[in-house]
Structure formats: structure tokens, C-alpha cells
Amino acid sequence: MEEKKQFTHLHELGEFGLIQKITKDISLKQASSVIGIGDDAAVIDNGDKLTVISTDLLVEGVHFDLMYVPLKHLGYKAVVVNLSDIYAMNAAPRQITVSLALSSKFTLEAIEELYAGIKQACNYYGVDLIGGDTTSSLKGMTISVTAIGQAHKNKIVERSTAKKGDYICVSGNLGAAYLGLQILEREKQVYLENPNIIPSLDEYTYLVGRQLKPEARRDIVAVLNDIGVKPTSMIDISDGLSSELLHICHASDTGCVIEERDIPIHSEAVEQALKFSLPPTTCALSGGEDYELLFTISPNDFQKVDQLPNVTVIGEITDKSEGCKLLTPDNKLYDLIAQGWNALLNKE
Amino acid sequence: MEEKKQFTHLHELGEFGLIQKITKDISLKQASSVIGIGDDAAVIDNGDKLTVISTDLLVEGVHFDLMYVPLKHLGYKAVVVNLSDIYAMNAAPRQITVSLALSSKFTLEAIEELYAGIKQACNYYGVDLIGGDTTSSLKGMTISVTAIGQAHKNKIVERSTAKKGDYICVSGNLGAAYLGLQILEREKQVYLENPNIIPSLDEYTYLVGRQLKPEARRDIVAVLNDIGVKPTSMIDISDGLSSELLHICHASDTGCVIEERDIPIHSEAVEQALKFSLPPTTCALSGGEDYELLFTISPNDFQKVDQLPNVTVIGEITDKSEGCKLLTPDNKLYDLIAQGWNALLNKE
């Protein structure tokens, strides 16, 4: 009897499982490769300075829906999400490349809109568009952006260097981008059921704006530098607070505890979450796409950081044996779990 | 009466037309951006050395057909085509990033095969895989590779610096990869018509190998360096000799004349072209995917280069007013035209 070969489906592994499988035997051999796979960006030594490289692939129907994402916003966001990874290394973005695969449904005018957004982001963040590739696709649009940044040698902040006793901080507020997406999805359904109803998004400007036009936290990196604080670890929040915090703790071989009541959530996000019958904390922990910075600081820097307007201290790094926990207002401890959006669940 | 807005379809523009439209108002503002869009790769100044960046997007059904491209070969080729761009700048590749969009039809085992090819290319060319992004697609596979190279400041060779009187050289031979593709396409049709016939490709090893497992001409860059010759301009041949030569002449503001009888074509390619009733010269001029190097040299270096085993001198750079010409054995001059594969002709 012939033995049947067993195959493993990608959705059984998930994105991080697949990455782990693929990368387990990869070692760095070039003297100039300082940091490889496993952080927000890779780092290359150029003698004088470090070059920081990050790349993201955005697929129509998976990462964006052109029914409600204007092409100009899409171009802007595609750049910003990559710059966010460069800032999360405590580096400054300098250049980007943009590759596009396009089906014939797109016109020149559509692509010019997309590039208007790309160029706007380049201007706002002061980065140069230096290259790319343009080709066709059988279906839809795929955008690949690579960001190239620069940092002085002692400036890079990794995700693997948090220490027990460090404070855990986040910039801005969390969950709003996820709720913005839920609103857009709901309005899309309403429209699909009755195309005569024109959706009004006026009352959701803040939440929808956080989804459609996120910004990278260049300001936070700058202010921390100004007050002389170098985070002990840092990551940007693209997949939700839980997932990113688990990345830091896993890479740093630590545990953590964060206090639910300290997680910053915008009042409009709280209100909207309750309307959707979602716990606001869940939106902040698992929502994703906020592109805020999650970082840890030495206890010595607490005073300096605690007074910053757009930074909230939400917890502490603990010993690995204590696990990764959420402390609720009624003093119960729950395990943090990564419920971030799983990019490999789509079926062909 | 409402005026109807006119839209421009991408296939009316073609890839280069679209790139021209999109990039016309892009200027470089960062002091470190040395070369932007328009060459094989972009160049960034890092004080001591230059960083060279190139990126390519490969789409299933457009750039590769998994019916006859083994995943391991695909991974290998995806890396090589990017390294080829780095060598074409006279730089040395050091690192790559690989981003993948995958539909659920792919298993872990399939992706491991792809990565086996990627890693084999990394090992062979001595580059590190330092990052990427893995996500899902609604249909098929898209691969985005970015290669990062290094060069000393006076080493970079652009495509815009050919001068009248320079000799035009190519490495290796041309047209074989295109003929390999025609054989694979033919065997695919035979198989689709009768799946019981197992195609035999044994007699086409060389041509099919040039299509499925191309190599980048690291050796040519090394030997030119060894004999102290710095090309006056260089480009890699991905879209066919005509198209690339026109790029050099357009960027350098020159004309050119190449002699048909000097274009290097492998004997198996000549034989196969005739079997397909294709002029061998057409395969070399318009075939593409050879990943050979096309470069120009100063007349002073002619003696040194003419004796190299894998380099052929095929013509001369002329004044712009003389146009870009092919001289046939019967002494007729024809305009060179770019008939390279147009990546934007696919319909959704």
C-alpha cells in the first residue's frame, strides 16, 4: 500500500508559524548584516552609520477594499505603515521603493491618485521615492513598499532588549483604527444591500480617519530623543497591543503585566465599541492597525516619560515565569493572547 | 449635457509609459539619495560606502507558470534577477528581503521548496536573507524581492554615461532563455491536450535551464574589475537586447550601431529558433530573461576586453543623430525597436 504524503496547510500554521518554519535555518554570514529577520526592520552596518530596512506587502481584498478605501489614502497608508517600522527601530526613514502589480481594471488616473497619496506621505515625512517595479497582475492590486532608514550606531532599539522592572508605554490611543474599519464594513454592507443609500460617515471622522489615514509616530521618537530617553525595547502596533507585547516578551525572554484601566482608548472608540457590543479593551488589545509605538523604558526614566502628553505607562516587564498578563480593575489576572488578525486564513 | 471624463487604460501606456507619467514630478531631497528611479538600482550614500537597492515583483500567471516552473527554481530565480540588477550597477549584493503573498492552495511543503531555492541562491551568491513580509492573497502567489548591495564610491556604473565611440559589449549569449520558455509553453499545451503524455525535456536541457535557472553575471563584474576595466555604462538584459540598448542610448543621449553577425547566440538556440521558424536574431534582440550584462567600454580598454572568453563586442555608441541601428550581414541598417514583453497587457 502506498503511503500517502501528508501536507500541512498554511492556515494550520498561521503567519508567525510559517515564518518560524521558513527561517529556522537562516544564519547571517555577511559582516554587514547586524539584525536579520525577527524585528520591525533589518539593520545593515555601513561603517559610519546603520541602514534600516523594512518591507510590507499589501494585497487588494486582503489588506484593503477599494470599495471604501480611496486610492490616495491607500498610497499614503502603504508608505506610512513602512515608515512606522523604521521609527520603531528608533531610526529615521530616508527613502522608499514602491512596487505595484496592477490588473487592467486600473486606469492611469487611478494610479495617479494612488501615487498622489504616496508622494504626499513622502513629502510629509521627508523621504525620497527612489525605485520600484511596475507590472501587471491577473486580478486586483498588490503593493510592495520597502522603506530604508538611517540611524547612528548606538541609537537602534530592538524588541528583544526589555528587562524585568522596565515600564511599558504606548503612544496615543488604541482600538480606533479597528473600530473605523468596522464602521466602513457596516456601511459597505448597507450600500451593497441598497446602492441608493449613500453612507454618511460624517459623525465617524475620527475613527474612520484612524483607519484610512494613519500616521507614523515620528513625533514620539523625536520627543524621546529630545528628553534623552532611549527606550529599552520598541515595536510598532500593527497587529494589536497583545500581539506586539507578546513579541517583545518572547524576544526579550520576559513576562509582563499591564493594567486594563491604563490602556489609552479614545472616548469615541469607547462609545463606538459599546454600540457594536464589543468590549473597548478587546478592540485595543486585538484590533490592530493603530501604528502607535509600544516601548519599554528603564525605571530611571519614568519621571521624564510620565509627563509626556502622548505617552501612557500601562504596565511593567516581569520575570518570564510570571507570564504575560492583563490586570483588570477588579484585580483579576488574565493571560494575554495574540488574537491579531491572521493574515493566512484566506481561501483561494 | 454632462461631459464624459476620459480615462487612460494602462495597456495604452505600457510599463515604461506608466513609469514616466508617475515619476515625472519626483525629485530627490535627501542628501543621501544619489541615484533614484531610472537605473537598474537606486543608490544611497552612507558616508563611507554606497548602498545599492533593487526590487522586483513576480506574479503567478504573469511572470511564472507553476505548471512547469518548479518552486525551488522559482525561488532561486526570484533572487537571481534582483542580484543581476545589483551587479549591473557594478556593485556587490549583500542582503535580500523576500515578501510573499500566498493563497490557501499552497502548503507548507510547497513554501519550503520555494525557500530551498531562495536559500540556495543566497548561499551561492553569498547574500543574507534579512527580512520580508508574509501574507495571504486571494489568488495565486506574488513574490517581491529587494536586493541590497554595496559599492565603493567610485565604482558605481550607471546606464546614462555611455559616450560616442565607446564599444558595446555583452556577456554570454542571448535568446536562449526565451527559446527555453517557448519549449516549456509547447510542452504545457501538449500535456493539457493529453495528460497521459509525459513531456520529455531531456534534449532541451541547456535552453530550458537558461529559462528556469538563470545566473547573475557576478563573474563578469569580477573579471572586469580584475583587469582594471570600469565600463562606461552598464545594464542587465532582462527585456531583450534591443530594449536595454535603447535604455542606455536614451539615458546617455547617444545613438548606437550593432552588427547582427556579432550578436552571440548559442548553437542550440539557433537550431531551436529555426525549428520554431523564428529568426535567431529576433530571439536575441527581443527575447528577454537572459540576465546577461550589456555594457559599454572606452576604446582604450578594447584590447583588454576583446580577449575575455565570455564577452563579445557587438557594436559602437554613435551620435544621437545617427539613431539606434542594427547592421545586417548584407550591410543594411534597421532601426532597433523595443519589442520586449509588455508587462501591462494583461486583462483582468
Image (cartoon, coloured by chain):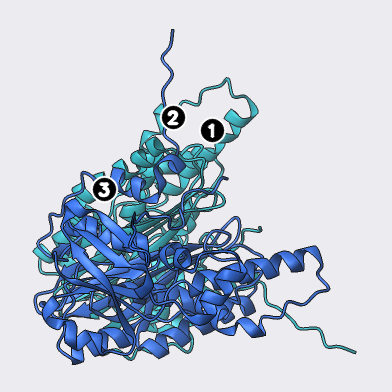
Chain colours: A blue, B cyan
| Foreground pick, B182 / B8 | B8
x and y percentages locating residue B36 in the rendered image: 35, 80
User: Residue flagged by tag 1: what amino acid is it?
Assistant: Glu
Say yes or no: labels 3 and 1 on the same chain: no
In this rendering, position of residue B161 left or right of residue A154? right
Mark 1 nearby-residue class (10 Å; few <14, some 14–19, many ≥20): some
Chain ID at mark 2: B
Residue at the image point whose x is 35% and y is 38% from the top: B113
What is the three-letter code of the residue carrying label 3? Thr
Quarter holding the N terminus of chain A is: top left
Q: Amino acid at mark 2?
A: Leu
Residue A267 seen in the current view: yes
Q: Which one is earlier in the sequence, the residue at label 2 or at label 1?
A: 1
For label 1, the SS is helix
| SS category of the residue bearing label 2 | loop
Q: Is residue B46 left or right of residue A169?
A: left
Expressed as whole percent of the image width and height from the top left, the position of residue B268 reads 39, 39
- Looking at the image, which residue sits at the far front? A330
Marks 2 and 1 sit apart, C-alpha to C-alpha, by 8 Å
A74 lies above or below B199? below
Q: Is residue A39 visible?
A: no
User: Which disc is residue B90 wearing?
Assistant: none
Q: Relative to B107, is A181 above or below?
A: below
Q: Is residue B169 left or right of residue B192?
A: left
Q: Please, is residue A24 above or below residue B126 in the view?
A: above
**Gap between marks 3 and 1 measured at Cα:** 35 Å
- Tell me whether marks 2 and 1 sit on the same chain: yes
Whether residues under marks 2 and 1 lie with C-beta atoms below 8 angstroms apart, the answer is yes
Structural distance between the alpha carbons of marks 2 and 3: 34 Å
Instruction: Name the residue carrying label 3.
Output: A23
Q: Please name the residue that numbered disc 2 is placed on.
A: B201
Q: Which residue is mark 1?
A: B187
